[in-house]
Image (cartoon, grey):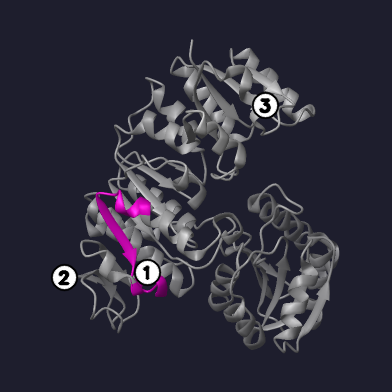
Amino acid sequence: MACSLIVGLGRSGVGAARLLHAQGHQVVVLERDNGPEQQSKAQQLSDQGIQTELGCPLEFSSFQPWLDQVEQVVISPGIPWDHPTLMQLRNHGVTVRGEMAVAWQALRDCPWIGITGTNGKTTVTHLLHHVLNQAGLHAPMAGNVGHSAAELGLQCMDPSQTKPDWIVMEMSSYQIESANEVRPTIGIWTTLTPDHLERHGSMAAYRDIKQGLLQRSKHAVLNADDTDLKSRQAHWPDAQWVSSAQTNHEPFNLELWVNPEGFVCNKKGALFPANALAMPGEHNRQNMLLVTAAALQAGLEPQAIERGLRSFPGVPHRLENLGSLHGMNVFNDSKATNYDAAAVALQAVPGPIILLAGGLSKQGDASGWLQLLQGKVCSIALFGSDRDVLSGLIRGSGYTGDLTSHSTMTDAVTAAIEQGKNRNAASLLLSPACASFDQYRDFEARGNHFREMIKQYSHSPSTRAN
């Protein structure tokens, strides 16, 4: 019997294994590690009838026992699409697919809204999911957020579950790259700035991957305020464009914009006030317009969209307001894993700012971020493996504020809070501008740790005395 080989016991791998097993496939999971966590997961899968082989590195020899019967190899987003072992498998005629492609096969009978972009896609995903569900539709979200795509596919196989009206799928470049069969009904492209260049090699390659998703979408919605997307308007003659800039829409066939009176408008007139979404920052106005365009395309009335926007509680780790400490508003923006996302946060929150930044640095243009540091940030506490890299960039830019360096975020937070006692700062902001993988499983784990630390400080006797 042909079998499907799943690479890795991460969330995507386990989800794909369980989904394919439920569909009747013979499944074998190959995992390179053999620690207690992997053994526990392997036992859980074994109890469900799924075979797992531990201690199998991502090398061609690990796959050889199954080459005569392998139907497909399914990889998680973290494995490079051009990994030498995957190329060897393809040369032997083996089909290699991503977990997202497996989910697409299970869920393709439902209309998808595929959301991609360097920054903003997670907020757009959460906000659109909320707006659609508040309007009475069943629109689960998955992908790069919430459920993995395969987990949602498995959930929807349950006959007791309501069939989704829409599937709201956040898709990273890694997921798009390994699932070119995905064809959303609506595709949304939020922004494009340099990111993941270590993986994709060039900005052009990174752009092409995301562009592919929109080209395969029946309806494309794009952000006219993004410099890169705007410069390629000619590539998208049939797309719906949105703009929050009042003077920016003349060259475009805009679907939505914000007028000088502060209303969201389309060609029929004003729809609702732009302040219906309470989240701070111009970038969140852009996110709101992208969501509104997609919701209109999905059949919602403007009044229903406005109700959803007004009731939206926000997104964890994206300028998440954690309250006040020593007179400072505290914001958790752990999702800011690159310079551009961190620059957006600096623009959105009130200054002077005490900033927490650091982790595993990425390639990219830091100039905009560095310029904002000089103007709004009075003190910076760096942490993580690449703190010295950031320190060199910051000092080299001429920054004259306080700058301290710490091995862990715990130490950096302690130092930043001490600074807050002595500074007339308006905001304490975690916006790392770096990936989290040097010290945390993901940006959520980093943000959760920060939230817990702030909660502890907020309840300490010394803090209450202030």
Please indicate, yes or no, whether residue 378 appears anywhere in the rendered image.
yes
Q: Are marks 3 and 1 in contact (CB under 8 Å)?
A: no
* Towards the viewer: 56 or 413: 56
In the shown orientation, is residue 364 left or right of residue 276? right
The image quadrant that residue 223 belongs to is bottom left
Residue 267 bears which disc, if any?
A: 2
What is the quadrant of residue 209 in the picture?
A: bottom left
Instruction: Bin the neighbour count of mark 1 within 10 Å (Cα to Cα): few under 14, some 14-19, many 20 and up.
Output: many
Give the CA distance from mark 3 to mark 2: 60 Å
Q: How far apart are marks 2 and 1 (CA)?
A: 22 Å
**Which dot marks residue 61?**
3
Relative placement, left or right, of 307 versus 374 is: left
Q: Earlier in the sequence, mark 3 or mark 1?
A: 3
Q: Which residue is drawn at 59% across and 59% down?
A: 335
At horizontal 68% and vertical 21% (from top left) the residue drawn is: 53
Query: Residue 215: x and y, percent?
Result: 30, 53
Q: Is residue 356 magenta?
A: no
Of labels 2 and 1, earlier in sequence is: 1
| C-alpha distance separating marks 3 and 1 | 43 Å
Which residue type does callout 2 highlight? Lys
Q: Is mark 1 on a helix, strand or loop?
A: helix
Residue 236 vertical placement versus 219 (above, below)? below
Q: Residue at x 50, y 31 (%)?
A: 151
What amino acid is labelled 3 in the image? Ser
Residue that numbered label 1 is attached to: 229
Q: Is mark 2 on a helix, strand or loop?
A: loop
Q: Nearer the viewer, residue 208 or 294?
A: 208
Nearer to us of marks 3 and 1 is 3
User: Residue 211 placed where, x, y %?
Assistant: 37, 57
Residue extent of the magenta highlight:
212-231
Residue 221 is one of the magenta-drawn residues: yes
Task: Using the image, determine if residue 126 lies above or below residue 241.
Answer: above
